[in-house]
Image: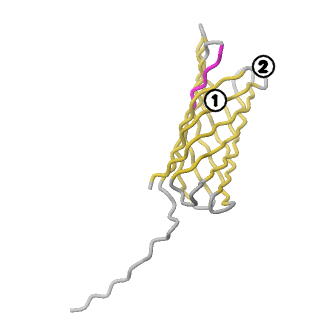
Amino acid sequence: MLCAETAFAQPVDKEPAAIVELGGAAGWSLNNGASNFGADAAVEFTPIENWLELEAGTTPLFSRHHSTEWNTDLLFKKPWTLSKKVELMAGVGPEWVHTREPGMRANSIAAEAVLDFMFWPGGKHKLGWFLEPGYDYDFARGHERSIGISGGLLIAIP
C-alpha cells in the first residue's frame, strides 16, 4: 500500500503570534508644561496581515508633584514594511486615564495617535527595539493635551 502526502514548506520569515513591548516612557503636557516619566508594557498582534495590527498596553507615569497617571490603551495600527529590518506603523485608538494626585483621583477617556518605528537588527523578527512618539487628547474637563515618547525592547512570541 502506498501513501502519497503533500508537504507544505513553512515560510522562512513567519510572522510571530504576538510581540511584547517593554520599555520606558516620557510625557509632556501641552496645557501646563508638566512632565512625567515611567515604564511601558504592551502586547501587539496581527489579525489582518499588512492591514491591521492591534496593540493593548499600559503606562504608569510619575511626576515630581507626587502624582501618578495610568494610561491604558487599545491602538489600531496600519503597518508598512520599509525593509527587512525596519517597520513603521501609524495608529489611533481609545485610552483610559486614571490620575491620582494628593487628595484627588480621577478617571477619564482620551484618544491617542502614535507612530511606531520597529527595528529588527538581525533581520529576523525575534528580538528588536521600538520608538513610539504619540499625541494624547483627554476628553475630561480641561481637555488635557500631551505629547510623549516611549521606547524599548521588542520580544517576538512564536
- Quick check: is 32 in the magenta stretch? no
Residue at 64% across, 18% down: 63
Q: How many marks?
A: 2
Q: Secondary structure at mark 1?
A: strand
**Quadrant in which residue 97 is drawn:** top right
Q: Amino acid at mark 2?
A: Asn
- The residue that disc 1 covers is 109
- The residue that disc 2 covers is 32
The answer to whether 36 is drawn above or below residue 137 in the figure is above
Q: Disc 2 vs disc 1: Cβ atoms closer than 8 Å?
A: no
Give the extent of the magenta segment: 59-64
Earlier-in-chain disc, 2 versus 1: 2
Residue at 59% across, 19% down: 68
Disc 2: CA contacts within 10 A as few (<14), some (14-19) or many (>=20): few
- Residue 123 placed where, x, y %? 58, 60
Residue at 63% across, 50% down: 118
The N terminus sits in image quarter: bottom left
Q: Residue furthest bottom?
A: 1
Q: Left or right: 31 with respect to 61?
A: right
**Quadrant in which residue 152 is drawn:** top right
Q: CA distance from mark 2 to mark 1?
A: 19 Å
- Residue 22 placed where, x, y %? 54, 39
Compare residues 66 and 124 and report the one nearer the observer: 124
**Label disc, if present, on residue 78 of the rendered structure:** none
- Residue 133 placed where, x, y %? 70, 40
Q: Secondary structure at mark 2?
A: loop
The C terminus sits in image quarter: bottom left
Q: Amino acid at mark 1?
A: Ile
Disc 1: CA contacts within 10 A as few (<14), some (14-19) or many (>=20): some
For marks 2 and 1, give the one nearer the viewer: 2
- Residue 34 placed where, x, y %? 73, 20
The answer to whether 143 is drawn above or below residue 87 in the figure is above
